[in-house]
Image (spheres, helix red, strand yellow):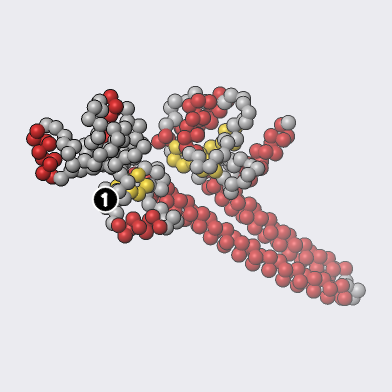
Amino acid sequence: MLEIVCLQEKTNSRSRRLSSGRRSTRNLPYLPSELKLACRNEPECSDNVSLNTRETADNKRNCTAPQMPECAKCDKPIRERHKRIPCSTCQQEYHTRCQGISDDKHQVLTENSDIFWFCKSCRVITSNMINKMVALEQRMSSIESSLKLQQEANRTLQDGMKKFKEQTEKTVGDLKKKVTVLKEEEIENLKGEMNFWKSKFYNHTEAKKTETTETKLKMDRLEQESKMNNLRIVGIPEEDGEKLQNKVLSITKQKLNLDAVEDSDIDLCYRLGRARDSMVRDVIVKFTSRDKRNLVYRCKRNMPRENPAIFINEDLTQPRNKLFYDARCLKK
């Protein structure tokens, strides 16, 4: 279909048409009656002119021209001649002038696919996520520093144990040489001293082992506390360009019959690990409140049995997950 976009006549002839209440077609080139001049978005443009003077209003309403996308800020159409920019998160498009983006910045964003641009609303969400990640990284950094100190203490202890072992072996060797000339009383005294040092070394080693175990338990407890608002969903089919949050909301509403869970109740939603062709990755869902998380977890029994099956589990740390797996094996 031949289209000529927004053909405008001269200013004087247009003013004469407006005053007379008719459109003049004197200066228009001759075209067959079935060819029309139409805008890309006919309902919103006032410059559409039909070469067929017998065209009715019904034919205008039946226009099948593709609709122009609208700017998410000014709600006006984004035409082909306009410069646009999409948000890297919500994918809504904006006029560059509505966002105050110069032509140079627009050219840089267009030519570099590894540079992302976010709209104002997505910028707030991204900033909150970054702040939470920074806080978590700082917490993990403090835990790692304490673990490094513990590892250094363990290395120091191992070095001491090695030196003590060498000294003990040397002392035992010397004693073996002199044992033939020592009296029984002296031998008993030496045995008592050896037992004393052995018990002292054993008590020191056990104390360090207990301290190391307590440190590991503390780290595990801190990690589990950070996952108290999380759930792990297994079996959600994986697709390219998927919107996980929408899939999770669909599961809660359609399969669990929960209308109380809204989009604002989900803080974060992502898949674990790298994508593989032969494996469907688990989905971690972090809720904004523990009450919503517990509500979804309690209703998991309402999940229908279907193929592929979908399971809703707690997001446990690696030691607790292994312990839970061993307990299930014993139950079977």
Q: Position of residue 161 (x, y in %)?
A: 71, 66
Q: Is residue 120 visible?
A: no
From the image, tell me which residue sits under label 1: 97
Q: Is residue 116 left or right of residue 215?
A: left
Amino acid type shown at disc 1: Arg
Q: Position of residue 65 (x, y in %)?
A: 34, 35
- The residue positioned 43% from the left and 27% from the top of the image is 260
Q: Quadrant of the N terminus?
A: top left
- The residue positioned 59% from the left and 60% from the top of the image is 150
Out of 2 and 128, give the one closest to the viewer: 2
User: Residue 48: which quarter of the image?
Assistant: top left
Out of 145 and 92, give the one closest to the viewer: 92
Vertical position of residue 118 compared to residue 244: above or below = below
Few, some or many residues within 10 Å of mark 1 (<14, 14–19, 20+): few
- The residue positioned 38% from the left and 47% from the top of the image is 87
Q: Is residue 125 left or right of residue 253?
A: left
Out of 87 and 28, give the one closest to the viewer: 28
Q: Quadrant of the C terminus?
A: top right
Q: Is residue 32 visible?
A: yes
Figure disc tally: 1
- The residue positioned 65% from the left and 38% from the top of the image is 324
Q: Position of residue 111 (x, y in %)?
A: 40, 57
Q: Position of residue 80 (x, y in %)?
A: 32, 46
Q: Secondary structure at mark 1?
A: loop
The furthest residue to the right: 180
Out of 254 and 217, give the one closest to the viewer: 254
